[in-house]
Image: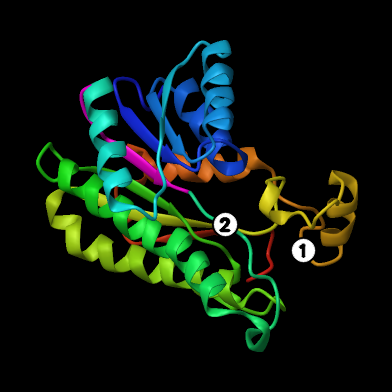
């Protein structure tokens, strides 16, 4: 119960890593606010947490809109009385294709969600945390941001590489405020972003088996465990770290 009496905000909490992490925080005693654009998916996450015996609520928010982000943080504080931990996980995987074939609007959309969304979220989370004793923030980056070698992923890889840099910059800017900022960089896993359109779980696992040194894709529990560790007091000396969880792809 590392997060008893803690309030945790998870963006992109309606599916994949966000849902798994929200459930993991709740199992360890946190009151969890899940945020995102898909209200129905957020409701499902809250119901799953309630079925586990945990406490959760949801708030609709588009992380590319600063008014939404400010309201998201304000609602978390209003509902639960504070904000101690944030997992900035909202993201999109789109704009697949070579650089020369990407249109500018699609490029901007990927960077708006994956990068600017993290910036805006941190801006308003930190504004609260720095006045109320500090906190911990974990951003979701990607191993593609570190190596950039996956064809067709220029927009996504660029956005996630920038998240890793932004994480380190924010960590140094605000360590003096008692706020630790870190990131996780997952590789291929059970989440929806690792799947091709129409691909089954078995087909996805087989496709990656020969590409990952460990011989399998990651689980969402493995990613959420890393997020919780970085957010916990156990990682109290981890500042500006980018924890890669990819089965050895970037080793």
Q: Is residue 94 visible?
A: yes
The residue where tag 1 is placed is 212
Nearer-N-terminus badge (2/1): 2
- Quarter holding the N terminus is top left
| Residue at figure coordinates x 27%, y 61% from the top left | 171
Residue drawn at 63 percent across, 85 percent down: 99
* Side of 208 relative to 170 (left or right): right
Question: Residue 133, relative to residue 175: is it above or below?
Answer: above
Q: Secondary structure at mark 2?
A: loop
Observer-side mark, 2 or 1, equals 2
Percent from the top left, x then y, of residue 133? 13, 38
115 to 200, vertically: above or below: below
The residue depicted at 30 percent of the width and 26 percent of the height is 6
Position in image of residue 115 (x %, y %): 42, 64
Residue 107 at what x, y percent from top left? Answer: 53, 74
Residue at image location 36% in from the left, 26% down from the top = 3
Mark 1: few/some/many CA within 10 Å (<14, 14-19, 20+):
some
Quadrant in the picture for residue 102: bottom right
């Amino acid at each position: 119960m590392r997060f008893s009496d803690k309030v945790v905000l998870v963006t992109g909490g309606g599916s994949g890593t966000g849902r798994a992490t929200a459930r993991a925080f709740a199992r360890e005693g946190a009151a969890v606010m899940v945020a995102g654009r898909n209200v129905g998916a957020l409701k499902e996450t809250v119901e799953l947490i309630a079925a586990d015996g945990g406490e959760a609520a949801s708030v609709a928010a588009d992380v590319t809109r600063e008014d939404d982000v400010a309201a998201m943080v304000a609602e978390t504080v209003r509902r639960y009385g504070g904000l101690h931990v944030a997992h900035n996980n909202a993201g999109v995987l789109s704009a697949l294709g070579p650089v020369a074939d990407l249109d500018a609007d699609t490029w901007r959309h990927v960077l708006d969600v994956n990068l600017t969304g993290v910036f805006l979220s941190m801006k308003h989370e930190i504004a609260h945390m720095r006045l109320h004793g500090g906190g911990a923030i974990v951003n979701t980056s990607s191993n593609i941001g570190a190596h950039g070698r996956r064809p067709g992923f220029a927009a996504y890889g660029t956005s996630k590489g920038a998240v890793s840099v932004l994480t380190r910059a924010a960590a140094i800017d605000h360590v003096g405020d008692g706020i630790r900022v870190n990131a996780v960089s997952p590789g291929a896993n059970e989440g929806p972003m690792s799947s091709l359109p129409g691909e089954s779980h078995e087909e996805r696992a087989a496709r990656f088996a020969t590409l990952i040194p460990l011989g399998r894709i990651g689980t969402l529990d493995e990613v959420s465990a890393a997020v919780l560790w970085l957010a916990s007091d156990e990682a109290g000396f981890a500042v500006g770290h980018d924890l890669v969880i990819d089965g050895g792809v970037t080793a």
